[in-house]
Structures are given as C-alpha cells and as structure tokens.
Amino acid sequence: ALVWLVVAAGMRKPGRHASRLLQLSVMPADQAALAAAGLREIKGVLEAVVIGDEGVAYLKVDRDQLNDADLDAFVIAQA
C-alpha cells in the first residue's frame, strides 16, 4: 500500500480535456489546413483536424482554458 501511495503521489492530475465536433462548410484541402491552423490558435484548442470534403472539424480542447466566444466566432466566419 505504501508503494502505491508513493507512485500515486507522483502522478499528474488528469486534464479536463474533451472532444468537440464542429460543422463547417465543405472546403478544399488547402483551405481545410488553414482552418485547422486557425482553430489551433484559439485559446484552449489543443488539437484540430479539419476534413474539408466532409465539412467537419474534430477538436481536442481543454475545458478550463477554452475560449468559447472565439470558437463560436470562428465557426460563424467559416459558414
């Protein structure tokens, strides 16, 4: 039990990460790459992959850091 306590004490607290799926407009691959880069610039977006021919973006976000207003503005601008 003491060994487990020592191991557990050194572990990091799990992050408050979540997945998000965004509906965007259909776009060519080069525009999708730019959109993904733009999404990654938003505070709290850890990872972004945009599939242009499907018009979707898959995000990994930090719920504590995510700026929802900036994310909403980005989606509106892409529509």
Image (cartoon, helix red, strand yellow):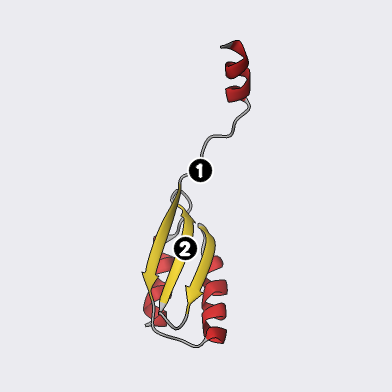
- Please, what is the three-letter code of the amino acid marked with disc 1? Gly
Hey, which quadrant is residue 55 in on the image? bottom left
Residue 42 - label:
none
Residue 19 drawn at (x, y percent): 43, 57
Residue at image x 39%, y 65%?
21
- Please, what is the three-letter code of the amino acid marked with disc 2? Leu
Residue at image x 53%, y 34%?
13
- Regarding mark 2 in the picture, which secondary structure is present there? strand
Hey, which quadrant is residue 23 in on the image? bottom left
Check disc 1 and report the residue beneath it: 15
Residue 72 drawn at (x, y percent): 38, 69
Residue 10 drawn at (x, y percent): 63, 27
Residue at image x 46%, y 45%?
16
Q: Nearer the viewer, residue 44 or 33?
A: 33
Q: Nearer the viewer, residue 6 or 15?
A: 6
Please identify the quadrant where the N terminus is shown: top right
Q: How many marks?
A: 2
Vertical arrangement, residue 21 with respect to residue 35, above or below: above
Residue 59 - label:
2
Please identify the quadrant where the C terminus is shown: bottom left
- Do the residues bearing badges 2 and 1 touch, measured as CB atoms within 8 Å? no
Q: Is residue 70 left or right of residue 8?
A: left
Disc 2 from disc 1: Cα separation: 15 Å
Q: Sequence order check: which comes first, mark 2 or mark 1?
A: 1
How dense is the environment of label 2, judged by Cα within 10 Å: few (below 14), some, or many (20 and up)? many
User: Which residue occupies the extreme bottom position in the image?
Assistant: 28
